Image (cartoon, rainbow, N blue to C red):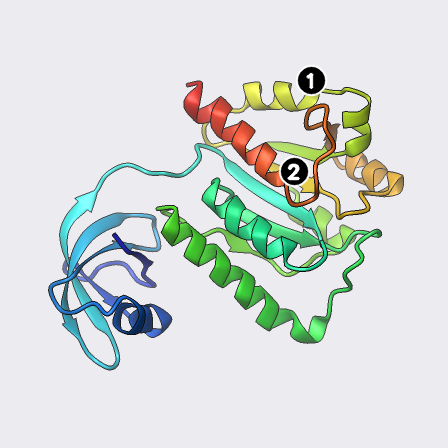
Amino acid sequence: MQRYFVEEAAIDDRFYIFGEDLRHIVKVMRMKEGGQIICVDPHGKCALCIIEEITDEQAAAEVVQWIEGSSELPVDITIVSGLPKGDKLEWIIQKGTELGACRFIPFTSARSVVKWDAKKAEKKVDRWQKIAKEAAEQSHRTKVPEVLAPQDLKSLLKLCLGYTHKLIAFEEEARQGEASVLSKTLTSMKKGDSLIILFGPEGGLTNQEVSILQEQGFLACGLGPRILRTETAPMYLLSAVSYQLELMR
């Protein structure tokens, strides 16, 4: 059943849907009055609804039943990705949303081949946010992940304060067979904890970047014995978190 993240909480058990979601209901799904949808309010509360009215400006959906439970990971995961080439970041956002990430922060690393064009910033971030929203709807999330504009190292460090755990996925650690840091981090995590983990671009992180991050409390970790692509590594991490904190408990 199609899911929509509505902008406002229900008023007298009725949701109102506007803009792109209204267009999707009418033009893409070709739904009529009487059709059923799931609405998710800004607080993550879900409800089975029936569309009662469709006008040119809005659709009104009446709550039939509130849905209990949540599909969210029990911990808050922020993925920091060194700006990769092509559409890899879009893929990371889409698949990372499906796997439960709460936040994505692109990172302009020293070895990022892609150079961030500030003039196109707003349009680009809007596209990334739309990808996250559509993936959250498809995967039945109750929250849409936040996607930030690309950050340099200095601004990134200001955003890292307050996290319970801070990691760097560093391929040099993987080459040396390091396996304990990630394992210890995952086994120590509790419901409500937060983790921020940084992944380098295709060329990896510089030693200087790693050193600066370590000075700010980040721990370098390996992701198993194989060297993973920049777009694959975040999926490995999110899958490991889900296995440890959802399937094993």
Q: Is residue 204 above or below residue 185?
A: below
- Mark 2 vs mark 1: in front: 2
What is the secondary structure assignment of the residue under circle 1? helix
Q: Quadrant of the C terminus?
A: top left
Are circles 2 and 1 on residues that touch, CB within 8 Å? no
Residue displayed at 77% across by 51% down: 153
Mark 2 is on which residue type? Ala
Return the residue found at the far bottom: 56
Which tag, 2 or 1, sits closer to the chain's start?
1
Residue 121 location (% of width, % of height): 65, 70
- Residue 98 x, y percent position in the rendering: 46, 44
Mark pair 2, 1: CA separation: 17 Å
Q: Is 111 situated above or below 190?
A: below
Look at 15% across and 62% down and name the residue there: 35
Relative horizontal placement of residue 65, taking residue 73 as reference (left or right): left
| Residue 64 x, y percent position in the rendering | 12, 52
Residue 178 visible, this orientation: yes
Q: Residue 207 sits in which quadrant? A: top right
Q: Which residue is nearer to you in this view: 73 or 24? A: 24
At mark 2, the secondary structure is helix
User: Horizontal placement of 22 versus 54: left or right?
Assistant: right
- Other-residue count near label 2 (Cα within 10 Å), few / some / many at <14 / 14–19 / ≥20: some
At a point 26% along the width and 72% down the height, the residue shown is 26
Q: Position of residue 94 (x, y in %)?
A: 51, 51
Q: Is residue 162 visible?
A: no
The amino acid type found where label 1 is placed reads Ser
Q: Which mark is residue 194?
A: none
| Mark linked to residue 233 | 2
Describe residue 99's horizontal placement relative to residue 111 as left or right: left
* Residue of label 1: 180
In the rendered view, tell whether residue 79 sits above or below residue 130.
above
